[in-house]
Amino acid sequence: MMRNLKIISALMDYPEAELLNAQEELTVELRDDPFLDTEQKAQLTEFIEALCARDLLDLQEEYVSLFDRGRSHSLLLFEHVHGESRDRGQAMVDLMAVYEKQGFEIGQRELPDYIPLFLEFLSLRPEQEVRQWLTEVSHILALLEARLHKRESAYAKLFEALLSLTEVSIEREELKEKVASEMRDDTPDALDKVWEEEMVRFTEGTAQNGSAQGCGDSLLNKRREELSAVQALHIQPSAQSSQSGPTGS
């Protein structure tokens, strides 16, 4: 098992008091990790120290502003692959099936492609399987790393650490140039434009029977909720898993 993924998952999740109180535990476990090199351990240790020195409310406000407004920094994997298309729903169903096959259960309201949850699942899988999964999503991880560097966010270090566990060669300068030209999508004007576009798409496909406005408002409210908060997700072993332990795929 790669416990470092459990650490990174906790650090990437919405910050709570329990995380700040676990500084010593996280640091010790990171120090003893056999998979990360010295440089990555040093960077993550620095991240932990800086995080735990901050005021919790400030951390939470910064987290929501960074990850939960706009889509460019979304911690939902399939948002970067499928956007709002129907393919995203099928991809989540397929990922849920993987979790269930390995004996893990998540709550009905939890999204399986939330990266901290995905990492928590991987932390209990065999090393070879973990590296394969991380390699398959490395293009998303690298894009998020580049975008977080552009915002001068220390969270970029978490994605650097994940990419170091793959054998993928990342063209960071190329990615840096790509994201440099991207317009921010978390400003009030940008968010209003997204909501307006979703309203137009919805009303264009709705019969003019007087119900479009109410349904449209529901659609916009749903998207606002998605953008304003991503709940902390935790995967739990099922009863069968706790008896027999995880099995390889």
Image (cartoon, rainbow, N blue to C red):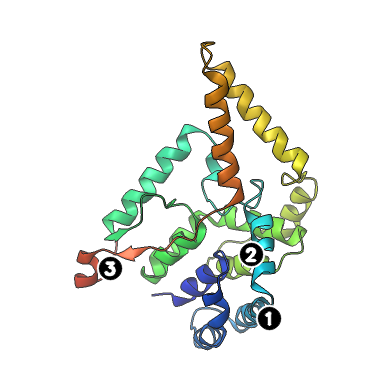
Left or right placement of residue 35 versus residue 238 in this view: right
C-alpha distance separating marks 3 and 1: 36 Å
Question: Which one is earlier in the sequence, the residue at label 3 or at label 1?
Answer: 1
User: Does residue 228 appear in this view?
Assistant: yes
- Picture disc at residue 60: 2
- Picture disc at residue 246: 3
- Picture disc at residue 121: none
Disc 3 element? loop
Instruction: State which mark lies toward you, 3 or 2.
Output: 2
**Which residue is under mark 1?**
53
Across and down, in percent, residue 119 comes to 46, 64
Across and down, in percent, residue 13 comes to 54, 65
Q: Residue at x 66, y 60 (%)?
A: 145
**Viewer-closest of 162 and 131:** 162
Q: Residue at x 63, y 67 (%)?
A: 160
User: Does residue 83 appear in this view?
Assistant: no
C-alpha distance separating marks 3 and 2: 33 Å
Instruction: State which mark lies toward you, 3 or 1.
Output: 1
- Say which quadrant the N terminus sits in: bottom left
Question: Which one is earlier in the sequence, the residue at label 3 or at label 2?
Answer: 2
Disc 2 element? helix
Q: Amino acid at mark 3?
A: Pro
